[in-house]
Amino acid sequence: MTGVPASAAGGSSGAHRARGTAAAADGARSEVSGSAPGPADEGGKAARGGKITAAAVNQASVWNVANLLTMLRLLLVPGFVALMLADGGYDPAWRSLAWAAFAIAMITDLFDGHLARTYNLVTDFGKIADPIADKAIMGAALICLSALGDLPWWVTVVILGRELGITLLRFLVIRYGVIPASRGGKLKTLTQGVAVGMYVLALTGWLATLRFWVMAAAVVLTVVTGLDYVRQAIVLRRRGIAERAAALEEKNA
């Protein structure tokens, strides 16, 4: 016994039935006359609108700050070459300006990847353009230095050959997995940047001797880390082949 009169309970049920009938009538009128939708329709349109808005944001995300820094590095390459070769390529003032452009490119290389990973700004454009920008500025600097006679051509060939070879190797084994960047690889990149930057500047005396040894360290790290990447690629390929074979045997069994 709840103490609720039957009339009150019946009134409550009648009220619910009345509201249901009114809602059904409103829905029918909405379908026939095309009038304003109810809350459910508004929710559906809001969901569809949210999807459209999200798609628009994803489409526009290529213009994020990480990609803009990558684009800046690409634009710095021809500017760097022009400054490096200005007035015959041996004027200290022009070489200092070329060093400034090279330094900006190296600094932005440190920041764009960090920003992309930290703030979820990774895009397909960035994945392709970032390594191209890195290789372009370093390759331009090495080729200019060798063309001017400041750096032996074999050094340029070793460094660029290693960079292009490892990039190709990554693509060849990507079906089996991704070769992660090692600490040695990061140290190699830093050492290369410092060494090439010192060669871009018109240094003399003990600084010129120091840059020789820094470049020697960069070449050693380039070769050692390159061989380590080859080892990782071989291990990754063998593991991938073994896993595929095991999966095929399990499937056939």
Image (cartoon, rainbow, N blue to C red):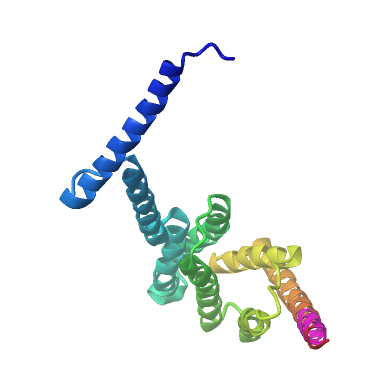
Q: Position of residue 50 (x, y in %)?
A: 38, 50
Q: Residue at x 36, y 53 (%)?
A: 48
Depth order, front residue of 35/115: 35
Q: Is residue 42 visible?
A: yes
Q: Specify whether 127 is left or right of 60.
A: right
Depth order, front residue of 137/145: 137
Q: Specify whether 176 is left or right of 52.
A: right
Residue that extends furthest to the top in the rendered view of this protein? 3
Q: Main secondary structure of the magenta part?
A: helix
Quadrant into which the N terminus falls: top right
Q: Is residue 208 visible?
A: no
Q: Residue at x 75, y 72 (%)?
A: 221
Q: Position of residue 241 (x, y in %)?
A: 77, 85
Q: Specify whether 124 is left or right of 239.
A: left
| Count of labels in the image | 0
Residue 210 figure quarter: bottom right
Tell me, yes or no, whether the highlighted magenta stretch contains residue 244: yes
Residue 151 figure quarter: bottom right
Tell me, yes or no, whether the highlighted magenta stretch contains residue 68: no
What's drawn in magenta, residue-wise? 236-250
**Image: 9 above or below 29:** above
Q: Position of residue 206 (x, y in %)?
A: 68, 62
Q: Specify whether 183 is left or right of 168.
A: right
Q: Position of residue 205 (x, y in %)?
A: 65, 64
**Image: 182 above or below 36:** below
Residue that extends furthest to the front in the rendered view of this protein? 6
Depth order, front residue of 32/122: 32
Quadrant into which the C terminus falls: bottom right
